[in-house]
Amino acid sequence: MKRMVIFEPAMCCSTGVCGPSVDPELLRISTVINNLKNNGILVERYNLSSNPQIFIDSKEINRMLINNGIEVLPVSMVDGTVVKTKAYPTNEEICKFLGVTEKYLKGTVARTAKGCGSSCG
């Protein structure tokens, strides 16, 4: 399974609802990531104000911040490779990057049991 990590600019929360106005893009990405999580796909998000050490520890993100400034954020990486900068990935891009269908972004996907049949107890 592919691993997506999103490095975000400094902000007070990840939902976008606590600022002076609601940021619909933050609301969209929070909802999509929550739905992915509910479907067994973990997308990690790191906020510069809450997780500064992660930004320092990631050589690629650290290099990008030094060379381009914080304007480069948000940065999305999949399996250690930068796939998008300066904006959150669209729903279509997330599907492409993670190799999932759009159903995974919108709700719980029914999964069928594999392998053990009725002997798993």
Image (spheres, rainbow, N blue to C red):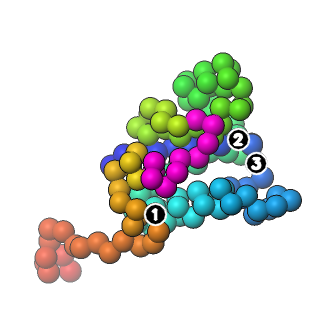
Report the residue at 55% width, 24% height from top: 59
Image coordinates of residue 13 in percent, x first then y, are 73, 55
Instruction: Give the CA separation, mark 2 to mark 1.
Output: 23 Å
* Pointer 2 local density, CA inside 10 Å: few below 14, some 14–19, many at least 20: some
- Marks 3 and 2 in Cβ contact (< 8 Å): yes
| Circles 2 and 1 in contact, beta carbons < 8 Å | no
Residue depicted at 71% across the width and 45% down the height: 50
Magenta region, residue range: 85-94
Residue 11 badge: 3
Residue 101 position, x and y percent, is 35, 60
Q: Residue 9's mark?
A: 2
Measured from the top left, where is residue 15 in percent x and y?
A: 68, 60
Q: 113 or 90, which lies in front?
A: 90
Estimate the x, y position of residue 63 in percent, counting from the top left: 60, 21
Q: Which image quadrant: the C terminus? A: bottom left
Q: Is residue 61 magenta?
A: no
The outermost residue toward the top is 67
Q: Quadrant of residue 38?
A: bottom left
Say if the magenta span includes residue 90: yes
Q: CA distance from mark 3 to mark 1?
A: 24 Å
| Badge 2 element | loop
User: 112 left or right of 95?
Assistant: left
